[in-house]
Amino acid sequence: MPCCLSDAAISDAAFLALPVSVVAVDAAPRQRILEATYACVARWGLSKTTVEDAAREAGLSRATVYRYFPGGRDELVDAVVSWQYQRFFGRLYEEVHGAGSLEEVLERGLVFARRQVLEHEVLQKVLQTEPDVLLPKLTVESNRTVGLISGFLVPYLHEHGLPPGLEVHEAADFLARMILSYISAPGRWDLSDPDEVRTLVRVELLPCVTGETQIVDR
Amino acid sequence: MRHSSQYCLTVSGGRLELVRSEHNDALASASGVSSQRVRLADAALQCIARQGIAKTTLDDVARAAGCSRATVYRVFPGGKDGLVSAVVDTEVARFFSALALRMGAASDLEDVLVVGMTEAALRITEHPGLSYLLEHEPEVILPHLTFSHMDSVLSVSSTFTAPFLGRWLDHDEAKRVAEWAARIVLSHLLCPSDGVDLTDESRVRRLVRTFVLPGDRADTTETVDSNPVCTHITAQTGAVEKIDRSPRTTKGEAS
């Protein structure tokens, strides 16, 4: 996976992927601490970020940070990973929730999610420098995500219709796993090319739930 | 385990080689130094399965192998890193060798996928070192199985598996299905599901029928009778034969 990171290009605003003003004084303290910690992680990485750094960045006292995160540094870092992870899938949800068909959900979702992964500078940086710290945390999160994605897909699968003998939750769980798999590692497919994504969806993903070969115009 | 195939994988110079073997113990029949490497790698694996990589010392390995620390250093001048790579090489070779035996003996497309995936899941979940590491030192394993490294794993696995599927599918389709099967196994390894136990062959058969083969019912009669031979597959990630990055255009050739 190419790393699109260059030190010069890094700014707090880019890391937050939000206007800096969002880290406002009146933001709820927990949220403010998370955003401040994220800015620290972007600068120094997961391992080197301390409670003191986060407190300073948020303009709060150490005691306040500990009040919201009694587990200290470890809890804080876990919470930041969780928060970013949920934001990632929150955005994915925003992107696909209005889609009219299962096919559209899959196509739009894969293109969007893959682009988000590649363009997420902090994720790319930490994947390069601290995969050993990040990945066990992401794996814990992804166990939950299979359930979330599969829950989201259920109504679409109902509408799409399944072959006899295939239970909707079984199909949803399977599709959710494959979606996560492609987001993490596209393998032979170029997910930045909408035509290829369309082929992938019709040749690999949809046949699972329709039970028949999709004839693709190649 | 079945020993119906005459093919076996050996490790040489960082590469996996599938060789025609008169014996089923091609690994052990290697030269003296190689067998000492394997013996020490096995001792190291024992230690890793008990206490993980971080806590395993060369003294532990020497003790488990019944030799001196000096011997370990003579065989592995690089020390622990070299020893750990030898463990990985040996175990990767055994893994693919076991898969080759099972898949080489399969008689139809559904079967080759079912036995391949079941064997892979069994080998992975019952592997003493791997299960310890996934539970206690996931930071050692996960970087090799996710994101860009997962692409390499998929590429190695599908390059290895495709020739076995090639008896029933054309080359590009074989590769695509092989990657698909590898994704399923990896997904369940990293994120175990309550309802799906991939070590249960009947469960895998349902998965294959439902999710892998609906698009590939093309031709389930065996067309090529000979064993598939895949001569050189690099065990280390990244250096495999060039993978076609454009499924769309290659698929066009098939139609």
Image (cartoon, coloured by chain):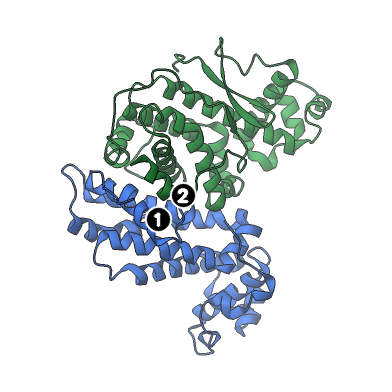
Chain colours: A blue, B green
Provide the secondary structure element on which disc 2 rests.
loop
Residue A70 visible in the snapshot: yes
Amino acid type at circle 2 is Ser
Q: Position of residue B202 (x, y in %)?
A: 30, 30
Quadrant location of the C terminus of chain B in the rendered image: top left
- State the CA–CA distance, disc 1 to disc 2: 8 Å
Amino acid type at circle 1 is Glu
Q: Position of residue B249 (x, y in %)?
A: 42, 49
Quarter of the image for residue B195 reads top left
Q: Quick one: A70 or B126, which is closer to the camera?
A: B126
Q: Is residue B83 above or below residue B23?
A: below
Residue at horizontal 42%, vertical 66%? A112
Q: Is residue B136 above or below residue B11?
A: below
Could you tell me if the residues under marks 1 and 2 are in contact, i.e. CB atoms within 8 Å?
Answer: yes
User: Residue at label 1?
Assistant: A196
Q: Position of residue B231 (x, y in %)?
A: 57, 26
Per the rendering, the mark at residue A148 is none
Q: Quick one: B150 or B204, which is closer to the camera?
A: B150
Quarter of the image for residue A8 reads bottom right
